[in-house]
Image (tube, grey):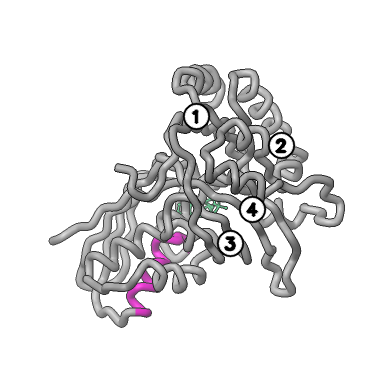
Amino acid sequence: MQAIRRKARAKINISLDVLGRRADGYHEVKMIMQQVDLYDEVEVREIESGIVLESDCGFIPKDQGNIAYKAAQLMLEKYNIHKGVHIYINKQIPVAAGLAGGSTDGAAVMLALNELWNIGASREELMTHSVALGADVPFCILEGAALAEGIGEKLTPIKGLEFAWVVLCKPNICVSTAEVYKSLQLEKLQKHPDTDKLLIAMENNDLQTIGENLHNVLEQVTETMHPIVKDIKRRMMEYNALGSLMSGSGPTVYGLYKDYYKARSACENLSKVYKQTYVVKTYNRGNA
Ligand code: ATP
């Protein structure tokens, strides 16, 4: 039986701004997202009926609670397919980390099933359907780097960072995205990211300027709940990062580096305390 395997990559936020709260509870955001080469491996194969999801990771749901499972349901319904799917997820991306781990698995399942069943849907079409699974899923289908607006689903592809190393460090704590957004006091925000400046710096691959202007308005909220986030940022800067930021609602903190040896050294030092520390390249579409 044919199987399709895909790499489902994690993302980091170069910036994250919240512009307002909508009546339906969603937040209007403006953020620059960049994929990195830390990935889950997702495999799909056809079975007679139903959806079966297995994983080497004990911490993720294996039923409708898993975005990858929901993605398979969505593809079966939208394209009127009367077959079943077996999904296997080899989990490498830390769970509930601010790295869009679940969203990227959902995106990978949609792309893989499109291929497995020769559905022939365009990326744009899959992106449109995928909003129902979560605001970050369309970006994970697009891949690479983008400016995300609306609730995160309005995407403008941008030139991604090149020749950059990213050290990811996930402390062993759990952060609820919903709780972080709930605690965010929009009116009290004193600083917003300079998204335009960052977009120009992305275009020029100006890592220095990007490092100096990384900003995420959720950082302060998560830091207040978990001071460890601030501590990792401080250490990342001590280990010569060009800049450091919490990704999404956290708690993962990353450091940006031009120099691989500095990045590796930071990773080695941090991993003595934090087991989930990685050094990875940025990922852009067209990368091998
Ligand atoms: P985001 O950055 O989009 O907010 P995240 O990286 O913070 O996402 P996830 O790893 O996607 O968080 O996990 C958030 C929750 O979603 C977890 O508590 C987990 O139970 C659930 N979940 C559902 N499907 C998955 C999946 N395929 N992988 C990981 N978590 C999943």
Give the residue pinned by disc 4: 177
Q: Residue at x 33, y 75 (%)?
A: 76
- Nearer to us of marks 3 and 1 is 3
* Left/right of residue 223 with respect to residue 98 in the rendered view: right
Give the residue pinned by disc 3: 152
Query: In the image shown, does 59 or 184 lie closer to the viewer?
Result: 184
- Nearer to us of marks 3 and 4 is 3
As for residue 160 lying within the magenta part, the answer is no
* Left/right of residue 148 with respect to residue 20 in the rendered view: left
Check whether the beta carbons of the residues at disc 2 and disc 4 lie within 8 A of each other.
Answer: no
* Prevalent SS, magenta region: helix
Q: Name which of mark 2 and mark 3 comes first in the sequence.
A: 3
Query: In the image shown, does 14 or 51 lie closer to the viewer?
Result: 14
Identify the image quadrant of residue 57: top left
Query: In the image shown, does 160 or 14 lie closer to the viewer?
Result: 160
Identify the image quadrant of residue 106: bottom left
Q: Name which of mark 2 and mark 4 comes first in the sequence.
A: 4
Q: Residue at x 73, y 33 (%)?
A: 227
Q: Name which of mark 3 and mark 4 comes first in the sequence.
A: 3
Q: Looking at the image, can residue 272 be seen? A: no
Q: Label 3's element? A: loop
Q: Name which of mark 4 and mark 1 comes first in the sequence.
A: 4
Q: Name which of mark 3 and mark 1 comes first in the sequence.
A: 3
Give the spatial CA distance, label 2 vs label 3. Answer: 25 Å
Check whether the beta carbons of the residues at disc 1 and disc 2 lie within 8 A of each other.
Answer: no
Q: Which residues are magenta?
A: 65-78
Give the residue pinned by disc 2: 226
Callout 3 crowding tier (Cα within 10 Å): few <14, some 14–19, many ≥20: many
Q: Residue at x 37, y 79 (%)?
A: 78
Give the residue pinned by disc 1: 277
Q: Looking at the image, can residue 212 be seen? A: yes
